[in-house]
Image (cartoon, rainbow, N blue to C red):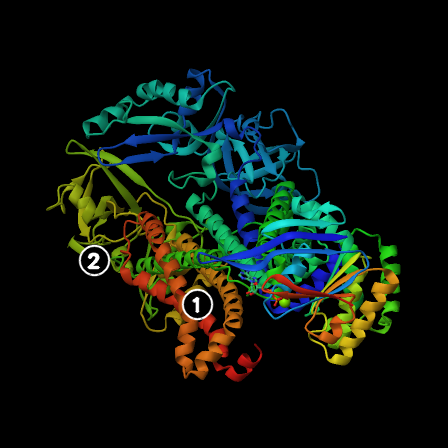
Amino acid sequence: MLKNYLKTAWRNLWKGRVFNIMNIIGLSVAVACCIMLFLTVYYEFSYDKFHTNLDKIHQLYFTKNGADKVEKSTSMPAPLTPAVKAEYQDIKYITRMGNGGTIVRYGNKQIEESIRFVDQDFLKMFTFPVVKGDNASPLKDLNNVVISEFVATAIFGKTNPVGKSIELNYSGEPRSFVVSAVVKDFPQNSSINFDLLLRFENAPEYQANMKSWDHHDHNVFVQLNDNVKPAVFDARLQSFVKKAFKTTIADMKRDGARPDAQGNVYTLNLLPFAYNHFDTELVGLEGNSVNKTYVMALLAIGIFILVIACINFVNLSVARAFTRAREVGVRKTLGANKWQLLSQFWIETLLVCLFALVLGIVIANFALPGFKATFRSQISMNMLLQPVQLAVITGLFILITIIAGLYPALLMMRYKTVMVLKGTVNTVKPGKVRNILLVTQFSLSSLLIVCTLVTWQQIDYLKSKPLGYSKDEVVSIPVGNSVNGARSLELFRNQLNGEPDVVAVSGAYDNMGSGKDGSTRTSIIGFTYKGHDIHTNIQGVSYDYAKTMGIKLLEGRDFSREFTTDSNAVVVNEKMAAQLGGKNVVGTYLPMDDKKPSLIVGVMKNFHFRSLRSEIEPLTLVLSGYEMNYIFVKVRPQNLSKTFSMIERKWKQTFPNADFQGSWVNENTERQYKAEQRLSTIFISGAIIAIIISCIGLLAISFMIMVQRTKEIGIRKVLGANIAGLVLLLSRDFLKLVLLAALIAFPLAWWLMSKWLQSFVYRIDIEWWIFALAAFIAVGIAFITVSFQSIKAALANPVRSLRSE
Amino acid sequence: MLSLQHISKYYQTGGNKAYVLNDLSLDIDQGEFVSIMGPSGSGKSTLLNIIGMLDEPTNGYHYFMEQPVHQLKEKQRSALYKQYIGFVFQAYHLIDELTVYENIETPLIYQNIKGAERKALVADMLDRFNIVGKKDLFPAQLSGGQQQLVGIARALIGKPKLLLADEPTGNLNSKQGEEIMELFSKINKEDGVTIIQVTHSEKNAEYGSRIINLLDGRIESTTTL
Ligand SMILES: Nc1ncnc2c1ncn2[C@@H]1O[C@H](COP(=O)(O)OP(=O)(O)O)[C@@H](O)[C@H]1O
Ligand SMILES: [Mg+2]
């Protein structure tokens, strides 16, 4: 029986191959998209799940309920950890984690690696199993170093590293450490990554930092005892905070801090480590946190595409099935019962779905590299072979075949055999359901079109908004670790001296935008000024910073080599000046350091030194005390690319051992909106795929309907209707549906995109024309699709269609 | 073998009942060859469909092989149908996607007959109808007469006791029609299959043993030959 079913199924599929190929294309594209999207979503949700204690691990952070805003910070002072541990029995493990970079020397090998300074509990809390060496207490001694397998191979090759000494240079003077253990490489979906683990006591300035509760520079993780509730512990922590940060709290209260519901202005809180990967609010978390909205957008688009493809599948199957009503009738007269007929149709559907699944996997395989690059996804096709994925795929597969295969079959079986055989069931329109399905498809498509248009517009706005400094003619070069910043700046300045295309050279502590080195630094200091608390961002700069960056000075002057006292001078922005009282701040002193107040020599016009996601904050430029991490070169607007090559060449001459990672500042500022770019890429890809699949369905349905209406068209033509009128008549019903779909989608789209835009301080308004444009696009594409068929039908020779009746 | 008593069938059109069959009674014995005649719209097809259980009367009693069909559940009725009845249509209604062989085989599949037995039965049938050479062709590749031959072979493959034919020669020329009628006679005589056919042709009707004339849903006259 099965063989017979398969044979018939195959012949039927072949007979309806135009439909079935459309069906399979639509479905397989959807399958490919869904595989990639759902795997990505799964991957993001799998972050850090490999830690066996994940649910019990929390990260500490401070909440500062200031007068005008709430600030959260994960940076902790060094003495906090031992103090908290001594105070609370609830804590099972606690570890600090500070960062550093080092040059590792072993024999005559020398490589750069990153360091995590941790406490001994670190390896007990987190699941980074030791594969070689001391399993019990790998960081027992202060001179122990734990390395990852990857680093072990990089340094030692095939020899066993355990017990070997390596020399690390991370603080200016080389020190020797003994490798006590090698741990398994962290998986890709780990927020915490490391090359080398050293005891926290080895961190630079450890002794000094242990005396200071104001110097916050590392993260702290705790694992609570099994029976302790995090919320309870969180509440209990506050008595400690009140004791340890008495002065901070007093200062905050004086400056009008607004206490939270419990009456606290400064609190220490717990962030479950399980949320770490999705928390984009707290700055300074480990790993690349992703916005949950972004992941949900991927999920939603995956579901949209799947729904659209399934709708297509149902619509196409129904359309096809109606051409087979007679066959069903005949089979009934030959003694087929309901289940036999249903299984026949189900097998056909199963075959189509199977084709689509296989083709989809093949497509996904081909599209994967591009997808991974575009969406920064870490997935691989092997992930499909895990039991959860296999179960989900099988489940979805069966569900889809049942819905898409059985629904049309059931529809057909409702018809009376006699009528079908007489031909009086004129392949009746499955009107309502089909229309609802079409509207759903195009609603989803319209939604994606609006999302695309809004994100495009917003990104364009972000890119083109003047930032208050010149970004088009400035090259920013990250200095890198291998050379000293200030010295290399001087060297390079001399090198470029006399180059006709170079206007000015300067340097700074922090980059503008996000450079090729990918790092940003933030330095904020607070101090008391005329009896109230002042906070300001600090940017360490070199001479000519304002000139190089094209920043306008409103009052006073930039730093100058002619004033030796400028080493202790500052230049502030308008916002900072306003905070200090507004007028006549030039010439006054800023008590950033009580013993040595700094003279304000100039006030700059506000400029966006951070991304447009945030407001301009107070900023103070200082000449000394900060490393020069970036060199800026302002060039003449002519021959930009030639000048860029010249700078690169000069850099390589001057620093043969350092990489050249220079880039235009406008590239850096655009890089800040990579997440938004990615979101818009998702929307546009989703929209295109959704529309293509919807149109495949529309095409097939319009084909069906034209066939049904051949006679009517013939009669109208004989009666004198013209082609254009006929095309319009035939397309009108579809266009009405698409328009309706768009109208349904718009409120939702508006709501969604307004929410999204709220994450930007600087944003566009969603204007009516976006919706008009989206509707026009949707209707336009639908019209083109339908008119393929309607024009063909309208052009057909009426005599033929009438005679065939 | 078959008894219809006071069968009526009407459709509700607007407020009126449009009677297609009006209090019609009819008995047919095993081995008869009955021809039903009458003008278009007189209810011939409806009558045949009711007999073949493809359609249900609005009222009346319907017995088939001693079973009260009007009281049976759908499932029992279709079992009865499967076992005893074969249908032949004016428009042949072969399944386009199946070959001649497969078309004839299909009813056996639905009767859950094993492959080997099916093979033998179909081979026999092909042989008997002289269409062995055509067994791998598709319906579209056959003439009308040949298609109807396949249709009859398919109707007979399940060894029905009753063969129902609705204008089996309606789409055929007179020579082809004659061949079909000869075949019917032969089936009727040699295999003892009861046949009820609807026809417009006097000549074809006379192959039967009894002619029933329908008019407006009633039996107007019966002629026994
Ligand atoms: N579904 C229906 N609704 C209303 N009238 C019907 C329906 N089906 C058949 N009829 C009517 O029943 C009558 C008899 O039809 P039929 O049995 O096919 O006649 P015949 O086969 O003798 O030409 C016709 O007048 C037809 O219009
Ligand atoms: Mg008829």
Q: The residue marked by circle 2 belongs to what chain?
A: A
Left or right: B190 as drawn, with respect to B146: right
Left or right: A624 as drawn, with respect to A449: left
The relative height of residue A402 versus residue A660 in the rendered view (above or below) is above
Would residue A370 be seen by someone viewing this image from the given angle?
A: no
What residue is shown at x 49% (from left), y 58% (from top)?
A434
Q: Looking at numbered disc 1 in the image, what kind of residue is underneath it?
A: Ala
Callout 2 crowding tier (Cα within 10 Å): few <14, some 14–19, many ≥20: some
Where residue A128 appears, as percent x and y from the top left, is 59, 33
Which residue is under mark 2?
A: A552
Q: Quadrant of the C terminus of chain B?
A: bottom right
Contact check, label 2 and label 1, Cβ < 8 Å? no
| Camera-nearest residue between A240 and A170 | A240
Secondary element at tag 1 = helix
Across the whole image, how many numbered discs are drawn on residues? Answer: 2
| Camera-nearest residue between A57 and A73 | A57
The quadrant holding residue A498 is: bottom left
Left or right: A533 as drawn, with respect to A91: left
Marking on residue A622: none
The quadrant holding residue B210 is: bottom right
The relative height of residue A87 versus residue A528 in the rendered view (above or below) is above
Secondary element at tag 2 = loop
Would residue A642 be seen by someone viewing this image from the given angle?
A: yes
Which residue is under mark 1?
A: A782
Left or right: B12 as drawn, with respect to A232: right
| Camera-nearest residue between A57 and B24 | B24
Q: The residue marked by circle 1 belongs to what chain?
A: A
